[in-house]
């Protein structure tokens, strides 16, 4: 409203007032879409429904469970553990990145510097 009263152009209002508030939400949604796509891809590859790629995390999980016996022996557990750890850390890193973007663009979350 204040920008309208000062006769600011609509492009200025959109990019300076509205975009600052929307960028964190867009980025958070983008990170969540990446997370969902990655989980979907790993799930398809784990089930064997996608083209075989031996470097894919889904194939590695499949090998760890069914050929290395990760659930039954302590010897094969590290195969399963480190693949899941990589997936979780990648998702957690994206979430932390989106929180950082939100702190940059949201003036209420900034500390007194």
Image (spheres, rainbow, N blue to C red):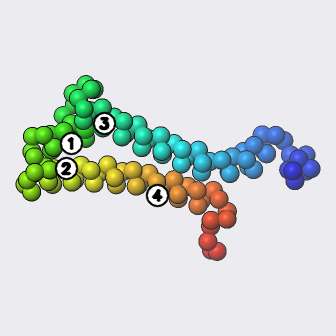
Seen at 66% across and 47% down, the residue is 22
Tell me the element at label 4: helix
Task: Tell me the distance, in whole angstroms, between the alpha carbons under discs 3 and 1.
Answer: 10 Å
Asked whether disc 2 touches disc 1, contact meaning CB atoms under 8 Å apart, the reply is yes
Which residue is most to the bottom?
Answer: 112
Residue at mark 1: 61
Seen at 48% across and 45% down, the residue is 31
Q: Position of residue 4 (x, y in %)?
A: 88, 47
Q: Which disc is residue 43 wearing?
A: 3
Q: Is residue 8 left or right of residue 26?
A: right
Look at the picture and state if 103 lies above or below 12: below
Residue at mark 2: 80
Q: Position of residue 93 (x, y in %)?
A: 41, 55
Q: Nearer the viewer, mark 3 or mark 4?
A: 3
- Number of disc labels: 4
Q: Earlier in the sequence, mark 2 or mark 3?
A: 3
Q: Depth check: give the residue in front, 104 or 57.
A: 57
Tell me the element at label 3: helix
Q: Position of residue 24 (x, y in %)?
A: 59, 51
């Amino acid at each position: 409203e204040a920008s309208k009263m000062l006769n600011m152009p609509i492009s200025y209002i959109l990019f300076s007032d509205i975009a600052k508030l929307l960028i964190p939400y867009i980025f958070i949604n983008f990170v969540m879409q990446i997370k969902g796509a990655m989980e979907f891809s790993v799930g398809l590859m784990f089930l064997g429904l996608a083209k075989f790629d031996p470097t894919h995390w889904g194939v590695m999980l499949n090998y760890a469970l069914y050929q290395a016996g990760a659930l039954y022996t302590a010897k094969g557990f590290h195969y399963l553990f480190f693949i899941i750890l990589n997936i979780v850390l990648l998702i957690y890193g994206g979430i932390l990145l989106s929180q950082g973007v939100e702190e940059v663009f949201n003036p209420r979350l900034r500390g007194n510097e």
